[in-house]
Amino acid sequence: MAGRPDDTAAADRVTGASRTALILVAATAALSLLFAIQYYLGGPIRLPVISEVLSVAVSPDQRSIAAGSQDGMVRVWNMPAAFSSAILAEFDLARAPTWPVQGLTGHRGAVIELVYEPESGDLISVDSQGEVRFWDPAQGKPTRSMTIDGPVSDVDFSRDLSTMASVGTDNRVALWSVETGQLIGRLGSPASARWAVALSGDGVLIAAGMGSHIQVWDAQTGTLVWELAGNCESQALETEDECLQDDKSWLAHTKAVTALAFSPDGALLASGSADTTVLFWNIQTGKVASSSEGHWGPITSLQFDPEGRAVLSTGADNVLKTLRLPGGKSSGTYGGHFGAVERATWGPLDTMLVSASSDGTIRVWETANQYTIHMEWSRLGLQRVWGRTLAGWMLVSGILGLVAAWGLSRIERWSHILAMALFMLGPIVVIGLPLFEVLGYPLVTVTRLRISWPLILLAVWYTALLVALMREPVALLYEAPRSARLAEQLQASQRTIRLRFGVYGVGVWIGLLVLLFTVLRRFKLDVAFMGHFFSFIMGGASITLYISAASIALAVVLALLGALGRLSRNPIANGISSFYISLIRGTPLLVQIFVWYLGLPQLGIRLEAELAGILALGVNYGAYMTEVFRAGIQAIGKGQHEAAHALGMTRGQTFRRIVLPQAFRIVIPPIGNEFIAMMKDSSLVYVMGVWELTFRANKVGRQNFRAMETFLIAAAFYWVLTVAFQFLQGKLETRMARGERK
């Protein structure tokens, strides 16, 4: 009886701790759900996010830059008179002063096109809903407006801004009078999706994409001039089959046309596609004059310089390029945006370019060295994807959090695991990734904190919640049912502890993966390039798996025979086995591969590269695994041999039924390690020209000077394969050890 007050106090402490955890979980779930509901209903409480910049233009006097955003606002920055492309050595983009900005509001949709009138300097803007506004930048107000059929995906103007071409959701091309706002005519049929339209400078020709083809009309008569589908590099070959048979390139788009632009003289039409290529069509002949590759994502816009000697191309690969004419060869690459580059233009000075991106910024570039000399934001914030991701996470975590709170109130063991997993694993990704991304913004620390403080506050809240959930009194309360017998409580407690440990482990892994991803982002990896060549590189994965599996099978057979030879009392067998192990372990694997592939042909034996690789790997690893098998066999006690002999078993039966099964259980971990090592060493067969994973990664990386990206793809595959095999190995070890546990 003397101990009862202490027991009661302990119970009260447990109840108090669990009540605190329950209140925190319920409050977190309720607040998360409320945030998600108001977010999807258009409420004001949300993360600060940028507004994607979709269009950009430079004023005729070269002193102002206008940009149209997803939020329907047109922002006009006035460049300081003393600004130039000459940057001092101590220049820091993060600390560069911002320019004065003027906001022009009134559009209901995203502003997809901007153009300045060359004489008056007035600004024309077009939004995705089909509203066209004419602005006097000095007054900051629209002087007039007109409406065209919307929604609109692309528009283009003639050089004198008298006519405008548009293409919308009806997939037809419309020609409009800018002065009167009247429809001049419609062209084309709505048979195929159209994403891009271009109007020649003199307003005579209109081009629009039709899937992967391009149609060109006479704007005055409405007649179809060309349907551009492609042609052979050799003009003498007319069909694609003839072209490929003659080892020539068939010049055509294979995916939808996403960008079009006429040269100033109207002689060339540049087309960009979702297949990442840019083609230059001769309007007189309807043939491809030249082609250009280099982007690794869909082309988003094309613009000729005033002299028609170069083209600016932008892409979803976060890069803009200058393509030199004739030929279309890249003469400059500008990388640094965090999102797709939607539009770019020449100016404001002869040594500068301006780009607009979905990352919410415009950048001014110096053309000689291709570096950013100024940057402005539509508005400071995180990338839009993180705002949507957080809202989705809040909705899911709110619902599941309420379920977990209900379970916690009923002392259900699963509810504690659910709450821990929910509020540990989710926030690591949803909060960790955007927080680390902000660190890469070229902004001062104070500005970064202005952007990321809501995420920091959330991280602190979730940390406090996890601390409350992981307190020992709370964890003990949810480890096992108190109504069960002691033995059942112990078993349930062990299962709960293993589950909790697993949640911790997964959380650590995810956290380290987020950190690794952030570190890799500092290398400025071309993610679009990796995506473009991912399928090609991974095409070698099947060969890697085949070589690894065949090699390990051969190695196991040789290792078992070698172990038996080493244990044999026959001097010949023992000597052969010892010599084999010494020779193979004493020479490098790469040398052995060359002997199998390059040495045997001198004896008249020619092996296929894959077979030579399998033999080299199998023989090499068989020598190392021989000692593993020998140790496993010798680990079986002498008493088991004697017992088998007493039962009348022969030496062969004893080895087959008693020794070998137990030896295999012992050698599974070291054999697993050898197999993992062999999978990675299978990459050495690339020296024989086998088109496995490493060979393909090396080939693409060297051709495009992007070895870091390609070898990361290969490394990721090897890693995933290793993790999968480790999991299977663990399951096999558990299964093989069942008899011993019993």
Image (spheres, rainbow, N blue to C red):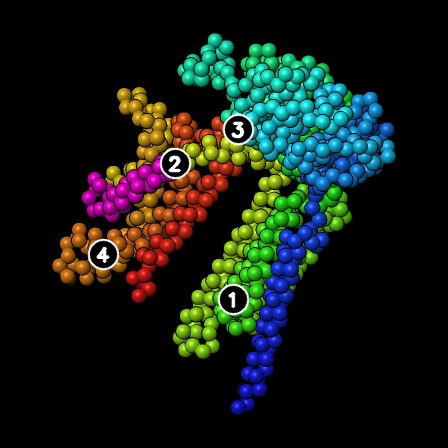
Tag 3 and tag 2, C-beta contact below 8 Å: no
Q: Quadrant of residue 405?
A: bottom right
Q: CA distance from mark 1 to mark 4?
A: 47 Å
Q: CA distance from mark 3 to mark 1?
A: 55 Å
Label 3 secondary element = loop
Label 1 secondary element = helix
Q: Is residue 366 left or right of residue 430?
A: right
Check disc 1 and give the amino acid type.
Answer: Ser
Expressed as whole percent of the image width and height from the top left, the position of residue 500 reads: 50, 63
At x 27%, y 42%, the residue is 557
Check disc 4 and give the amino acid type.
Answer: Ile
Residue 636 painted magenta: no
In the foreground, 13 or 419: 419
- Name the outermost residue toward the top: 236
Check disc 2 and give the amino acid type.
Answer: Ser
Q: Is residue 704 visible?
A: no
Q: CA distance from mark 4 to mark 2?
A: 37 Å
Return the residue at label 2: 542
Residue 570 painted magenta: yes
Tell me where the magenta segment starts and ends, as one range: 545-574
Q: Is residue 403 left or right of residue 449?
A: left
Label 4 secondary element = helix
Q: Residue 658 bears which disc, if any?
A: 4
In the foreground, 636 or 699: 699
N-term-proximal mark, 4 vs 3: 3
Expressed as whole percent of the image width and height from the top left, the position of residue 474 reads: 56, 71
Q: CA distance from mark 1 to mark 2?
A: 42 Å
The prevailing secondary structure element of the residues shown in magenta is helix
Expressed as whole percent of the image width and height from the top left, the position of residue 99 reads: 82, 36
N-term-proximal mark, 1 vs 2: 1
**Foreground mark, 1 or 4?**
1
Q: Residue 191 bears which disc, if any?
A: 3
